[in-house]
Amino acid sequence: MKPSVEYALAKSKEKGLPLPPGEWVNINQIEWKNRRFLLDQSKQLGPIFKALCWDGPWICIVGLKESQKFIRENDAYLTPQTLRLQPLFPLGFLRQMKGETHQKYRRALVRAIDPIVFSAYESQHRQMIEEELDAFYTVQQETNNLRDAFIPSLNRIASGLLIQIFFGARYGSENFKKLMHLYHALGPNGLEWQIGDQQRQAFSEIRECINEQINVSSTSRREWLPESIIEQMRTWGPIDETMLGNLIYMVEMGRYDMYSLFRWLAKFAADSPEWIDRIGLEGDQHSATGKTPAEAFVLETLRLEQSERLLRTVEEDIEFGGYLIPKHATVRLCLWEAHKLPTAFPEPFEFKPQRFLDNRYSLDQYAPFGLGIRKCPLADVAIRMGTLLLKVMAENFAVEPLNDGPPIRGMYHWEPAYPFAVRLVRKSA
């Protein structure tokens, strides 16, 4: 028995407080075979239950109301599990900061994001997406291995969109090309969890490139868009190493998450041609809830996929819901399962974007970007990026599925079947 499990059992006995129900089963192994296992467990055991994963005790919470209450009451005793970036810059990643330090850096980031006018980017974003989709359309005539062409194309779109929004490098400029190259070096095969020499070198060169931008004279700023996050911050005064490091790695983590979301959008687009036709025809027409068909499509995709879980390491013994949540345990806040509860979403495993055109959902029902004070500040950016990709795709192409199959567990997310790709069929003018 692992020391952390022994600790949990001993503390439960000492405090006279039960651990959550459930056997010490290894959910990592079970989930590979049965993705709905935790949802089934919650039906049998209630919204809070225990298990094992990665050789340690896990406490699972299914239900957004319970999860929000847990976070709200205990955030000071929890550490988010994420990349350890202290070797690259002081204080590390924003999502792991605590107290006043977290408030300071988060406020600055939100302040820089809020005034961004996305319409200022749309023409360049559209041009980049159109050119990438056109290039993929051409390549698909020449190869049968469309997966290995499609994923890099989505990666370039996600990377380019974020590089423009964060750093303002104009599409096609030398600075844009340089940053695209350096980000590929930072994570050539996806997000690298372990920081090695290659990541240190690429990070250093990206930081140097951005510092040159920050310090460039006003007469030499034509290659940079004035509406970017970094430009907002530059006007306030010096940008410290912690903030700059966070911006660099928000792009790195974000581009992986975004091209993974783009794959799911393409998958559902191929499975739902009637919705792609509707998006192409209705464009920016809003429903009574204020959503366009493309926005509803993105929100429903996030409900079904990509938004999966939040992990917190417990730093002190916690009493919650009548149970002991022991120190050293990992708490898993189960977003994927919470978004499959039929009380909020009838026919929860069916892809039905219409539900977001007809209904407004509270944070107790729908929270794909996290909970509490650590909710992702870039939620609106992600939705806008996904929406624009869908609109450009729907205006120009029909989407056909290739090599479909059941989802697989990837390194960080569940993904469409390994060989899955799409074929684009150009629409007539």
Image (cartoon, rainbow, N blue to C red):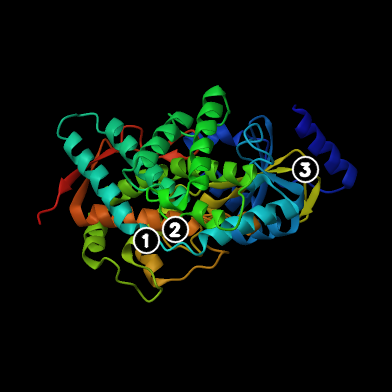
Q: Secondary structure at mark 1?
A: helix
Tag nearer the camera, 2 or 3: 2
Identify which residue is drawn at 34% across, 49% down: 265
Q: Is residue 392 visible?
A: yes
Identify which residue is drawn at 43% across, 29% down: 189
Q: Secondary structure at mark 2?
A: loop
Give x and y (percent) for residue 117.
Answer: 42, 63
Work out whether mark 2 precedes mark 3 in sequence or the reverse, and give the earlier one. 2
Identify which residue is drawn at 56% across, 64% down: 363
Work out whether mark 1 precedes mark 2 in sequence or the reverse, and give the earlier one. 1
Give x and y (percent) for residue 141.
Answer: 14, 34
Q: Nearer the viewer, residue 310 or 165?
A: 165
Q: CA distance from mark 3 to mark 1?
A: 44 Å
Q: Are marks 1 and 2 in contact (CB under 8 Å)?
A: yes
Give x and y (percent) for residue 232.
Answer: 52, 57
> To which quarter of the image does residue 373 belong?
bottom right
Identify which residue is drawn at 21% across, 59% down: 277
Residue found at the very far right of the displayed protein: 14
Q: Are marks 3 and 1 in contact (CB under 8 Å)?
A: no
Amino acid type shown at disc 3: Glu
Which residue does the numbered mark 3 point to in the structure image? 315
Q: Residue 165 has which mark?
A: none
Which residue does the numbered mark 2 point to in the structure image? 227
Q: CA distance from mark 1 to mark 2?
A: 7 Å
Say above or below: 313 vs 322.
above
Which residue does the numbered mark 1 point to in the structure image? 120
Amino acid type shown at disc 1: Ala
Q: Is residue 376 visible?
A: no
Disc 3 residue crowd, few under 14, some 14–19, many 20+, Cα 10 Å = some
Q: Quadrant of the C terminus?
A: bottom left
